[in-house]
Amino acid sequence: MTICDDLLHPKQLWSRQEILSRPSPVPKAPGVYAWYFRNMPTNVPTTGCVRNGEFCLLYVGISPSSPPMNGKAASKQSLLHRVRYHMRGNAEGSTLRLSLGGILADELGIELRRVGSGNRLTFSEGEQRLSNWMDNNARVAWTVCDEPWKLEHALISSLHLPLNLDQNAGNEFFPVLAGLRREAKIRARTLPILGR
């Protein structure tokens, strides 16, 4: 099985509950992860997406990110850290959660808000509703590789991945998703700051 088969034709798609179990099946190594979803709103274009049963591949990501060009130290994050964060973190630290929350805001009754000092933007108590939705509708696969940014670029340039924004401006859903995220941030900055 090739690296891309691990992502495009995985033997198993892992659930949130499995990812957050201890020990987690996600390796503490560099690599690429592929997010599959079902029950997305109809405005998300899934025609042409890679399918695995009832799930569609809509987003790929990497850990660590590519080494900085300015001489700073490279990230030491692993697949384990990033995949688990997407599953239980918040919109401030997860571009995937920010996108999903923007798309599902009306369905889940959530909105982006400023929290704490006012510099962080999260869905506050709505993060749990988003996590519950992911429990039922999100699955993930991954592959270990030493330079994941190269594989990520190849995947984004060759697949229909409507939830990816970076390197994906030509995707038909790009202006819609970018607009949802921008509008959510603008609105959040007009609302009172929440305690957490």
Image: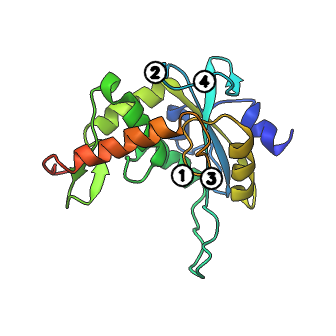
Circle 2 is placed at which residue position?
41
Report helix, strand or loop for mark 4.
Answer: loop
Quadrant containing the N terminus in the rendered view: top right
Can you tell which of label 3 and label 2 is closer to the viewer?
2
Q: Say the numbered circle drawn on residue 82.
A: 1
Q: Amino acid at mark 3?
A: Ile
Can you tell which of label 3 and label 1 is closer to the viewer?
3
Q: In the image, what residue occupies the spot 50% across and 19% down?
A: 39
Q: Say the numbered circle drawn on residue 62.
A: 3
Is any part of residue 144 visible from this angle? Answer: no
Can you tell which of label 1 and label 4 is closer to the viewer?
4
Is 50 above or below relative to 96?
A: above
**Distance between the alpha carbons at the discs numbered 3 and 4:** 22 Å
Q: Amino acid at mark 1?
A: Arg
For marks 3 and 1 on the same chain, the one whose residue lies earlier in the sequence: 3
**Distance between the alpha carbons at the discs numbered 1 and 4:** 24 Å
Q: Position of residue 187 (x, y in %)?
A: 24, 43
Q: Amino acid at mark 2?
A: Pro
> Would you say the residues marked 3 and 1 are in contact, meaning their CB atoms lie under 8 Å apart?
yes
> Would you say the residues marked 1 and 2 are in contact, meaning their CB atoms lie under 8 Å apart?
no
Q: Dot 3: few (<14), some (14–19), or many (≥20) neighbours within 10 Å?
A: many
Q: Amino acid at mark 4?
A: Thr
Can you tell which of label 3 and label 4 is closer to the viewer?
4
Circle 4 is placed at which residue position?
46
Report helix, strand or loop for mark 1.
Answer: helix
Q: Say the numbered circle drawn on residue 98.
A: none
Picture quadrant of residue 64: bottom right
Q: In the image, what residue occupies the spot 64% across and 44% down?
A: 33
